Amino acid sequence: MAPTIKPPQTLLMNIRKYGDAVLRRKAKPVDKIDADLQRTVQLMFQTMYAEPGIGLAGPQVGISQKIIVMDVPEKGRRQPLVLINPKMEEKRGRIKSEEGCLSFPGISVTIPRAEWVRFTALNEKGMPIQVAADGLLSRCLQHEFDHLNGALMIDHLPVHVRLKVLWDIRKRKKAGVF
Ligand code: NI
């Protein structure tokens, strides 16, 4: 009998969907940047790229810690970005745009966010970093930062629109597509 060679398996994390309590919990600061954290960050990137998505926060994979991985490509090139214990230092302007979330499959909402933001954080090696951005990167930073505070994109909707979206989610859950 020929030996069976198994292809290497890619480990992916389970993405928590809206309704999971961990998404409403306030994430704790990371207190140790070590090999375990780096492994978590790597798994989060793999999970995000597999979806595909452009941002993923710890609570979305059941880890209630202040960890964000993002990749908003620029000119078709990958721009992986890790933010540990991020802080929003500044924000300016206000702009409405459409966004989605891996914890809300099939749902997109149009909500206002700051136009420009500046964040400080640590990277996966524990080095201080600073990110200032507008456009999609700015929106993604604010969206993921919200996740660390237990806030979700639907919280930014006016009540009547939010109810419509929640109704839509209920329908999608029943149909097994959420
Ligand atoms: Ni999200």
Image: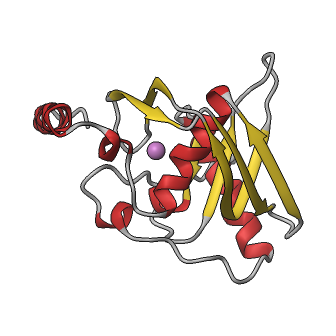
Q: How many marks?
A: 0
Left or right: residue 165 versus residue 17 is left
65 vs 105: above or below: below
Please indicate whether residue 146 sits to the left or right of residue 23 in the image: right
**In this view of the protein, which residue sits in the foreground, 127 or 110?**
110
Please tell me in which quadrant of the rendered image residue 101 appears: top left
| Colour scheme in use | secondary structure
Percent coordinates x, y for residue 22 in the rendering = 36, 66
Which of 76 and 163 lies nearest the eye of the viewer?
A: 163
Identify the residue at horizontal 45%, vertical 29% (top origin).
99
Residue closest to the far front: 93
Is residue 124 or residue 27 the one in the foreground?
A: 27
In the rendered image, the vertical position of residue 174 relative to residue 13, given as above or below: above
Q: Residue at x 43, y 51 (%)?
A: 15
Residue 60's spot in the image, x, y percent? 46, 55
The quadrant the C terminus occupies is top left
Q: Is residue 35 above or below residue 86?
A: below
- What percent of the width, then of the height, locates residue 55? 59, 42
Residue 9 appears anywhere in the view = no
Find residue 160 and report its image quarter. Answer: top left
Position of residue 36 measured from the top left corner of the image (x, y, whole percent): 72, 74
Horizontally, residue 38 falls left or right of residue 169, namely right
Q: Residue at x 38, y 54 (%)?
A: 16
Does residue 8 appear in this view?
A: yes
**Residue found 55% across the figure and 49% down from its top:** 144
Would residue 53 appear left or right of 20 to someone viewing this image? Answer: right
The single residue placed furthest to the top in the displayed view is 75
